[in-house]
């Protein structure tokens, strides 16, 4: 997603409720909630329960913020499912075609990136720069080399798209 936004010219559209958005947001995202969320205490389950209702005329609210239908948009909700998919369908019905959904939504984004848009470096996202014991055997999980997480797309050599030149 970061590559789409930083290099691809996409904008990040957050469709979570204001309640969820106030708990955490991606810097630079555009917030147009698809639902209104309310929390209440559920005495039966002894936990907080959430109720959601759709925002009426959501597309009209969106058109005020993103009027150009050619805008490249990444749509995000909390989990990348229900509200993001419904927002994508509504955008498609209204002829916004440069649209993609963020798999896993805000929760997945927040596991990978911090609020400064830097990749978190722990657990599965940490890079392993060790060389092991230098005696790599088949089937071992350590060995010589750098084991990267895939971060740093901006530092990758660009593809040469000049098809007339043969190297």
Image (cartoon, rainbow, N blue to C red):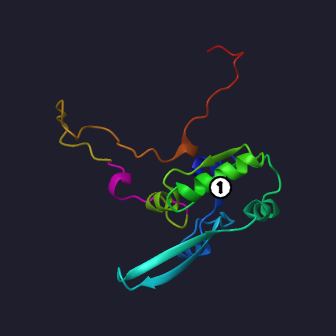
Residue appearing at x 69%, y 66% in the figure: 32
Q: Magenta residues?
A: 117-128
Tell me the quarter of the picture where residue 166 sits: top right
Q: Is residue 139 above or below residue 67?
A: above
Residue appearing at x 36%, y 54% in the figure: 126
* Depth order, front residue of 95/23: 95
Tell me the quarter of the picture where residue 60 sits: bottom right
Main secondary structure found in the magenta portion = loop
Q: Which residue is mark 1?
A: 87
Tell me the quarter of the picture where residue 26 sits: bottom right
Residue 131 visible, this angle? yes
Q: Is residue 44 magenta?
A: no
Residue 48 place in picture, x, y as percent: 43, 80
Q: Would you call the spot at circle 1 few (<14 residues within 10 Å), some (14-19), or many (20 or more)?
A: many
Taking the image as shown, residue 123 lies to the left or right of residue 109, namely: left
Taking the image as shown, residue 150 lies to the left or right of residue 83, namely: left
- Helix, strand or loop for disc 1: helix
Residue appearing at x 32%, y 38% in the figure: 145
């Amino acid at each position: 997603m970061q590559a789409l936004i930083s290099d691809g010219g996409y904008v990040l559209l957050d469709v979570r409720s204001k309640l969820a958005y106030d708990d955490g947001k991606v810097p630079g995202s555009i917030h147009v909630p698809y639902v209104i969320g309310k929390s209440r205490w559920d005495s039966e389950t002894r936990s907080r329960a959430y109720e959601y209702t759709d925002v009426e005329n959501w597309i009209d609210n969106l058109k005020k913020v993103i009027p150009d239908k050619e805008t490249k948009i990444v749509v995000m909700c909390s989990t990348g499912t229900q509200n993001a998919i419904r927002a994508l369908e509504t955008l498609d019905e209204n002829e916004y075609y440069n649209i993609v959904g963020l798999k896993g939504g805000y929760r997945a984004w927040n596991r990978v990136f911090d609020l400064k848009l830097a990749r978190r470096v722990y657990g599965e996202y940490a890079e392993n720069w060790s060389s092991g014991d230098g005696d790599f055997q088949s089937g071992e999980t350590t060995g010589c080399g750098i084991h990267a997480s895939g971060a740093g797309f901006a530092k990758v050599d660009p593809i040469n798209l000049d098809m007339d030149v043969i190297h």
